[in-house]
């Protein structure tokens, strides 16, 4: 750590006649793609094309399983059981892995999407349902989750290699959790500040919390977005700065070992 | 052939709160299960349970990919492109294979479901889309299709091992196709006659067509149903008769080699 | 009140090839049907047939809007906004009302389904989203909800006529809420006791709570089920007893005025 | 006819997080909106907002029912029965009408979408299923279909008022049908030519066919698009030219009477 980090972005979220995201652009700027698996977004035709693109770009491919809620884009909490989570994650992992297999590659990591990511970050039993599915499918997969979350705990307990994700535009509390969006100061609005926080956490392993304290945080991957031109510019700026600082951008399979 | 045949039945077609089929009973009577993959029927929880049951029963597991039409149970023709068929079949194959992998087993065969089976039986390009997906996913999978259909042709052309399915309750035309359901005499109503046809085709490789001619038909698997008690009785009767005739009932992986 | 009560049951929950519920039997025994609207269950073909049957049976027709979660039968909490609830309820109300209009009848009441019913019973803002949709669609509709719930409060505040539902097989707390299913004694297992509670609440307006106190409860409708033969027997027994007690069974439009 | 015509465009085809179409722009340029009803596109939240916008713009609101195939945007033929068509159209009509009712307006016309429009244009029985649903729901609704199609025939036979739609960018055959897209010369690529064809058919009631003959065609509405800036420019040009020719642009309820 310190001289290597992954940049991950959600990809392949289009559906049928609906296009979303600037996949062609962002794919050139990141080291890992979280590929939607047809539950919260995407469809089989989009998934095939997305895997092709990721293979061509030479980046790591991750499964991005979500709630079966296309209408809500997987962003709404749903009260599913750990057993349902196990089955839903397995289904989506398998579907994505088939497109990978056809194209001679493999899934490298799993990052639950949206509300599933958030719920599993706080609910150990739900997280265990997810992590057991991943482990039973392929124990070499890397789980990508919020640093310090219960999902990371569950992944470790089950025996998965886990990667810690950092959100450059979010304030952290003293316990390492993200400051709730509903609270004042939850978002880091200033982009320069956001980038400085990334550099600092990578070089020192520390982040300044909302209350002004310094806490330790081990970081393996930074979440970036490809929704619009502005977001792409931000990714480009991060890349330049990381390069300047001598920090290598590499896929999770290289960062985690 | 002649002393060995597979009995296949559709399994795992329940969905959420909806139960359909007498899976617990029919699973004891067949050698291969065509497992629904969540498009025309089933859901991830049902798929997991169905694979568990099939593994416990020691029967062959096949993928049963269908149209994305739960409301119509995949029985309505849909005008999808060969590329869409490729992607939809891949997705479903992958999803089912994940549950198999978790339980230490593999998919042995693929039998398209309902309207997809019927359309691909007549449309070579659609069939090729399906068969290429199967081959690219795992070239050792067996394609189960209507004897003499274009789907079997496409499967052979692509390099898949193909298994010929026989319908005991349907009349055949002189060219080996099924007599259309809309025509008189399409269904073999008499069960004894149906069973005699099975025995004859297995022992002699011949079937008497609707017009009274004898044609050659190579048969690897017989389609049976588990929807109701009567259907189960019919399967039991077929089993007894086949055993009496010295014909072994075995999964496709043993019948085809 | 006291000499008149409605018996309501969920109807028309089949979907495509999937059949659920003994609709033909229970429809003869109740005075109001809660008709599924295609979100948590049912489809347009089933809805048309269900409205036809309800019209033929001469019972009250209610909309039974639920979460857009067919896989979970609308029984899983989903974190939707009041505005989403407004739109989802409107959509389902409209869809059902079209089948009613075609057959010369009208929707009489609205009873949210499953998890939506439970969530709205405790969340005033969500309940207001639902009730505003109902009111804006047709201010003469009757809202059927749990006696004393926030949904009833919201309905009253908005100007809807509200009907109080009683659950004969559930224990009540001192504040009039249902004892949580996770707690001991939540279910009234003994059927005779369940029926006595119904008679008592109708004749005296009082129910004995779990803690042994007596509280006042105004009751307009009793929820019964038609899932299986046993449930149907229970409905028959309730009917007989109510008749013997001189309590008329009548649709909500007659009970509420 | 001749001095009045409707301009219709598909609207409200966004879904959840997915945005499609430049609704805000095209709504100012047309006299009728075909509003998607949640089967091939749209969702309840989008429908509510779309009806609000159409009311604010003062244009006619039409239902745009389609196949239950969001993944294919309703553009793929599906083999549904006339009874299924009846139920599906009723469901969608009702859903849209509820949003209209809440906002003090009514549906004025019905135009089936995509593959349903095309199939019903050639299949009288399917068309009758659709038209009977419309008639039974509200016999005053106007059916908007391809001039001379079987759908128009079915609508007339059932007693609906019918409006004939003209496609400015498509060649016509001598029998008044559209030249198949797969054939040479099916599309009128030149925009000036397209506009001249519109003016001619409105002023003379005649169109020059692909083979060079002149046939009579009664036209009530012209289909325009709002997908992109270029399409919007074309609508503006048509408007200007029609105005210059003294042809009034008016909603179907005014054109048909």
Image (cartoon, coloured by chain):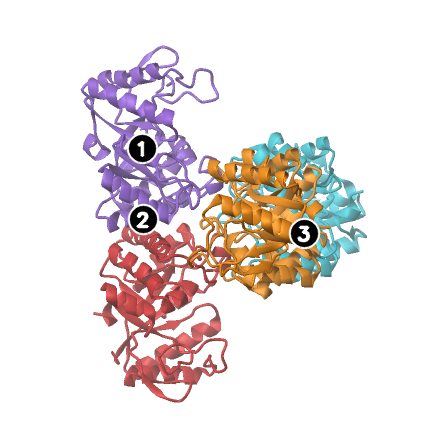
Chain colours: A cyan, B orange, C purple, D red
**Mark toward the viewer: 2 or 3:** 3
Residue C163 to residue C42: above or below: above
Is A121 placed left or right of C102 in the picture?
Answer: right
- For the question of whether residue A192 can be seen, the reply is no
Q: Does label 1 lie on the same chain as label 2?
A: yes
Residue A70 seen by the camera: yes
**Residue annotated with mark 2:** C94
Name the image quarter holding residue B96.
Answer: top right
Q: Secondary structure at mark 3?
A: strand
Ranked by sequence position, the earlier of labels 2 and 1 is 1
Residue depicted at 67% across the width and 35% down the height: A132
Mark 2 vs mark 3, CA separation in Å: 48 Å
In the picture of the structure, the residue carrying the numbered disc 3 is: B142
- Structural distance between the alpha carbons of marks 2 and 1: 27 Å
Whole-percent x, y for residue C191 in the image: 35, 17
**Mark 1–mark 3 distance (CA, rounded to whole Å):** 47 Å
Q: Circle 1 marks a residue in which chain?
A: C
Q: Nearer the viewer, mark 1 or mark 3?
A: 3
């Amino acid at each position: 750590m310190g001289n290597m980090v992954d940049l991950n972005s959600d990809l392949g979220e289009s559906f049928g006649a609906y296009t979303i995201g600037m996949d062609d652009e962002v794919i050139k700027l990141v080291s890992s793609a979280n590929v939607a698996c047809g539950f919260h977004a995407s469809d089989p035709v989009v998934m095939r094309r997305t895997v092709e693109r990721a293979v061509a770009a030479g980046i790591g491919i991750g499964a991005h399983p979500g709630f079966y809620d296309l209408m809500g884009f997987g962003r709404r909490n749903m009260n599913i059981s750990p057993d349902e989570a196990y089955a839903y994650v397995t289904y989506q992992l398998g579907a994505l892995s088939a497109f990978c297999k056809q194209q001679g590659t493999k899934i490298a990591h799993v990052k639950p999407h949206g509300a599933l990511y958030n719920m599993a970050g706080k609910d150990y039993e739900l997280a265990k349902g997810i992590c057991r599915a991943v482990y039973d499918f392929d124990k070499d997969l890397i789980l990508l989750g919020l640093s310090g979350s219960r999902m990371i705990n569950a992944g470790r307990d089950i025996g998965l290699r886990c990667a810690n994700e950092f959100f450059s535009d979010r304030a952290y509390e003293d316990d390492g959790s993200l400051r709730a969006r509903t609270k004042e100061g939850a978002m880091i609005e200033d982009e320069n500040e956001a980038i400085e926080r990334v550099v600092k956490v990578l070089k020192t392993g520390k982040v300044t919390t909302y209350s002004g304290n310094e806490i330790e945080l081990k970081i393996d991957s930074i979440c970036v977005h490809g929704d619009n031109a502005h977001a792409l510019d931000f990714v480009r700026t991060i890349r330049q700065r990381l390069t300047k600082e001598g920090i290598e951008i590499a896929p999770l399979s290289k960062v985690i070992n």
